[in-house]
Amino acid sequence: MEKQFTIMVVEDDTNINNLLKTALEKAGYKVLQAFSGTEAELILQMRNSIALVLLDLMLPGISGEEVLKHIRERGNLPVIVLTARDSLDEKIGMLTQGADDYITKPFEIPEVIARIQVQLRHAGREIENKQMTYRDLVLDKVTYQVRIEGKEVPQITKQEFAILELLVSHPKQVFSKEDIFSYAWNEPYMGETKTLDVHISNIRKKIKQVTTDEYIETVWGIGYRLHS
């Protein structure tokens, strides 16, 4: 396994929780254990590196349903529900409330591992679709953040992000100022280049705050492209 993902197991039955921990660690995952809904909430507030949650519903303290609700309010962290409820209505209810999958107790460990792998692959594809990369530059199309070598480029504006997005979408292509302006401002180019030139200059200055590498190249008489 190239990356060691962290799984949180939320299960009040100590034997089941420990069984899952042992099996998941053997499969190459890191494991965090929570034995109540309250403990799960505390871990979720302190840790942002969790890749997936195995969540029992019948928990002391905060219920599993409430934990699931709170996870969904925060984002799209994959959640597989562990449940003894096997009616169709119960299963549909779990999915409509935000669970990504469910496993009915008693379960077989190979099935748990397989379902985790499916959800992590799915989550990985979503992340890829929401990010654009060029060299060490990463554009996050959800948060509109720009990072280089993991460092956030500060105070990127909507137009600056759009300029980078267009350039990164075709890194070898030279874009005219007209094309860049029309894309970033979503309006026809009217022949004035100063606004675009200022934005390009600002992007370069902000990039310089996190790296000495050049990322935008001026092609005189035409426009701009990414620096190769």
Image (cartoon, grey):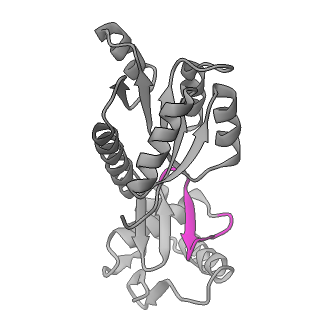
Return the x and y of residue 62 as percentages of the image width and height.
66, 21
Asked if 20 appears above or below 64 in the picture, the reply is below
Against 51, is 223 above or below?
below
Task: Determine the image quadrant of residue 172.
Answer: bottom left
Predominant SS along the magenta part: loop
User: What residue sits 61% from the left and 75% below the top?
Assistant: 198
Residue segment shown in magenta? 141-155
Q: Residue at x 53, y 88 (%)?
A: 214
Q: Is residue 173 magenta?
A: no
Q: Is residue 51 above or below residue 138?
A: above
Depth check: give the residue in front, 179 or 99. Answer: 99
Quarter of the image with the C terminus in it: bottom left
Q: Quadrant of the N terminus?
A: bottom left
Q: Is residue 74 left or right of residue 101?
A: right
Residue 190 appearing in the image: no
Of residues 3 and 178, which is closer to you in this image? 3
The residue sitting at 62% across, 31% down in the picture is 35
Residue 143 forms part of the magenta stretch: yes
x then y, percent, for residue 48: 61, 50
